[in-house]
Amino acid sequence: MLHRRTLLATAAATLAAPAVVRAQTTRAISFYYPIAVGGPLTAIIDGYCRDFASESGIEVKPVYAGNYNETLVKAVTAIKGGEGPHLAVLLAAEIHAVQDMDILVSLEDLGADAKWVDGFYPAFMANSRKLGKTWSVPFQRSTAVDYYNKTLFTEAGLDPEHFPTTWDGMVEAGRKLLKSAGGNTTRWGFKLASDTGNAQWTFGALANQAGGILMNEAGTETFFTDPKVVEALTYWRGLAFDSKITPQGTTAWGTLPSDFLEGNTAIIQSTTGNLTNLRDKAGFPFGVAGLPGKAGVRTVVGGGNLYFMKHASEAERKASLAFARFLSTPERAADWCMKTGYIATRPEAWETAALTAYVAKFPAANVARGYLPVATGELSTFENQRVQVALTNQIQACLAGTKTPSEALADAQAEADRILKPFRRG
Amino acid sequence: MRRESLWAWALILPALVMLMAFTHWPAVATLWDSLYSTPRGSRPPVFVGGANFRDLLDDPVFLTVLINNAWYAAVTIPASVALSLLMALSVNTALPGRSLVRMAYFTPTILPMIAVANIWLFFFTPDYGLFDQILSVFGGGRHNWLGQMSTALPAMMAVAVWKEAGFFMIFYLAALQSMPPDLAEVGRLEGSSRWSFFWRVTWPLLMPTTLFVMVNAVINAFRLIDHVVVMTRGGPNNATNLLLYHIYETGFRFWDTAAAATMTVVLLVVLAVIAGLQFGLLGRRAHYR
Amino acid sequence: MSTRALEIVATWVLAILWVSPLVYAVWTAFHPSAYATHFSLLAPWTLANFAHAWEAAPFARYFLNTTLLVGVVLVAQFALCTPAAFAFARMTFRGRDTVFALVLLQLMVAPDVLLVANYRTMARLGVVDTIFSIALPYLGSAFGIFLLRQTFRQVPQELDDAARLEGSSLLGRLWRVYVPLARPTYLAYGLVAVSYHWNNFLWPLVITNSVTTRPLTVGLSVFASTDQGIDWSIITAATLMTSGPLLLAFLLFQRQFVASFMRAGIR
């Protein structure tokens, strides 16, 4: 028995790194992951780990650690305490903060195959590179998309097969979709999340739509006062205060799907990760579309990447890499995509028979992939959480009507400058 | 006598050690931490004296949070105590469906706040949430209860009062039921009105309960933030951010342990001052022996 | 009479308001999700939400964790607070009042407030992410000591003296005279403690990492906060499932509960 396991483990090590077969073998790695979409995801992950174990002899111990933020907190505290995961799914946008903690090992140092690393969609690698190295690979990735109620489109005299592609078109459509009774809006044209924890993601897409970017690649500067970024917030505020197709004040992410299912709003901006959920529940035909921009469709990516931890032994590192490669095989990536609604991270996955058949049956699943070339990375800086909160607060103040877009963003920039100052040396 | 002393200490020691280890010691350690900078990466903490406190004074978010919490305490404490007393008084009289009413009042004690907060979230949902549905029957408009800065904190207060009053009601009810029934009899014979009877007899007798409930209400006004975590995460624009939530976020999301410690010190001072006031004002009137 | 009628109506309105989250939970959990926001008498009934919730998260494990946690806390609190309360109530020793004041401090400064410092202590002890570490800060309870001390002081001194004449030792008297007489206090205090720790959230959230330690509240919050937004049907089903036992216990024992509070002299 023991003999067989050793053999298997050796085989696994060989599989992971053909050149380096070490005396030390590993039989177990610890893997932290968050769950951000509903459904029995733990069971799916457990299944992958079992499959991997029977294939390689390496046991992966999956630890479901809560949402993204909790997973980050748990992983970092555990590592600081001398234990913790060897591999973890963390928010892609956390790269600067996590890398700065000096707990990661880069894919170059892991000796990962460069061709494999380059095989992911470039948009999903936008938050992966830093200091000339690659620190994570995409796993559960999504983009922002618009979901629209086709029945309401037809009712309003709009073409349900053609979703607007520009801001002007969006406002016009929104106006037509709006319904009110006795001075109160009974149906909104468009809703997008501005609550704490989500506003910065929504805004990342809007900024991209105006042609602006929120931060530099090094994560040390934010460009909140850039005229294009201000324009993006002006557009958002206009939706609430001028065309009034979206409510004033904060709109919660958590209730967007039910708002949509209720017919309380005709369009919502949400994640691709919501597709399966809405498909199962909507009692009306709905469409999935890219986000209209100032001039054309633009969106933002989101979701989590696989990060490799420095404290792992050589053998554990190899095992982690082997597991990451296992997860990115076309069949597995396609399976993950179909079961969760996340976008399969590599082009090969979309060519598998299973995913091709799925897309043929359910074309909406293919929409987001088409907009990857016009997607931007989400807000990602040092002290990311803090900068996010600073920006979110100001967006909320603006949408509540207490600050103009330029005032709000100037204040957000000042706060971000204060937070990021220590990271700008050298 | 010395033997008894030894015995007494032996009996107290286990509990005392636990209390010291997880209340007194961390309080002192927090004070100590507030004088040092946050360790980051390879930089160890350095002694900074009062710098953390000065930074705190310059932090507009902290001031907002402090003011929020002051309002929150000022409203939820008296409101929940008064309501709980009213509720207890009402189920202490003959009433159709009394046990049902009593059960209804128990709800908050049984359901975890973390779960109920999600339900309240539905109640507060604009347009088709429970409150807007009910209001629309009476011709009321839509309300973005949690999304507008003016109504978000009051909405959170309502949830807190719901939770607290239901819990405190139990204590008042127990106190009322243990009052000798002949007291009320005497009151009735004297012909005094219910109002004056309450103020002359019941209220003074309830003083110890009130003190106890007040202590709990104060702690919970600064301790219970489960609904903030679920419903608003402090938004919009910090309108519902409370002190302990801000501490939690600063310590466990921003990793700024020094700032978190500094704010904890402020919180401890606030609690100490209130405790002093409470025992000073109410304690003298409560007949504790 | 009309003011009385008004009072009754007001009481009922208040009661309906108070029970409404529970009523909503029951409604939503037993109906398809489309009815989570619509209230119609014709809505079909279903148990599917419970099945979904049960599948989506390891609630059985969370349930076990919470039960263990509450058990540990309760037993330890009783074991630690009883002797301390007895000493404060019936023994004289130097520094008694000072130490008692120190104990009472914890009434105001709940361990929840000190989570940053307590987290570090746990990390140093190497017990982060254990059920034990969730319970640890609460084991010494000022509330318990205070409550039991009040009760013990009301025990007639004659009973104590009689037991002493019969040759009972100090601990023997505590065990045979005081503890039995304080039974209502234990029950009342036990119920408060159970309700507190069953529902406690922030500290367990901070100190636990994994399914094997996470109590129900943390499990529920993790489960409720997904990218897909709030699914009230599933959440309410999970809520009812997890608070079911406590709910049932309260329904069955509410009379005894209030009675025990009465006799415990929590007032």
Image (tube, rainbow, N blue to C red):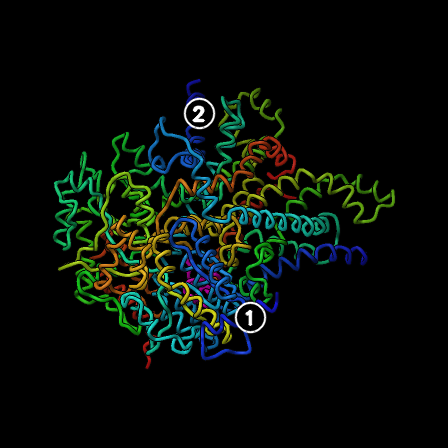
Residue at the spot 33% in from the left edge and 74% down from the top edge: A115
Report helix, strand or loop for mark 2. helix
Q: Which residues are magenta?
A: B245-264
Q: Where does label 1 land, which residue?
A: A7
Dot 2 crowding, Cα within 10 Å, few <14, some 14–19, many 20+: some
Residue found at the far top of this picture: C1
The residue beneath circle 2 is C7
> Residue A156 location in percent, x, y?
14, 40
SS at mark 1 in the image: helix
Estimate the x, y position of residue B31 in percent, counting from the top left.
Answer: 52, 66
| Residue A82 seen in the figure | no
Q: Left of A213 or right of it: where is B70?
A: right
* Residue C168 in sight here: yes
Query: In front: A426, or A75?
Result: A75
Q: Is residue B256 magenta?
A: yes
Q: Is residue C177 left or right of residue C221?
A: right
Nearer to the camera, C218 or B169: C218
Would you say the magenta stretch is mainly helix, strand or loop?
Answer: helix
Residue that appears at 50% across and 23% down = B97
Q: Work out whether disc 1 and disc 2 sit on a shared chain.
A: no
Name the residue located 19 percent from the left edge and 45 percent from the top edge. A189
User: Mark 2 falls within which chain?
Assistant: C
Q: Position of residue A104 (x, y in %)?
A: 43, 73
What is the quadrant of residue A233 in the picture?
Answer: bottom left
Q: Chain of mark 1?
A: A
The amino acid type of the residue labelled 2 equals Glu
Crowdedness near tag 1: few (<14), some (14–19) or many (≥20) residues, C-alpha within 10 Å: some
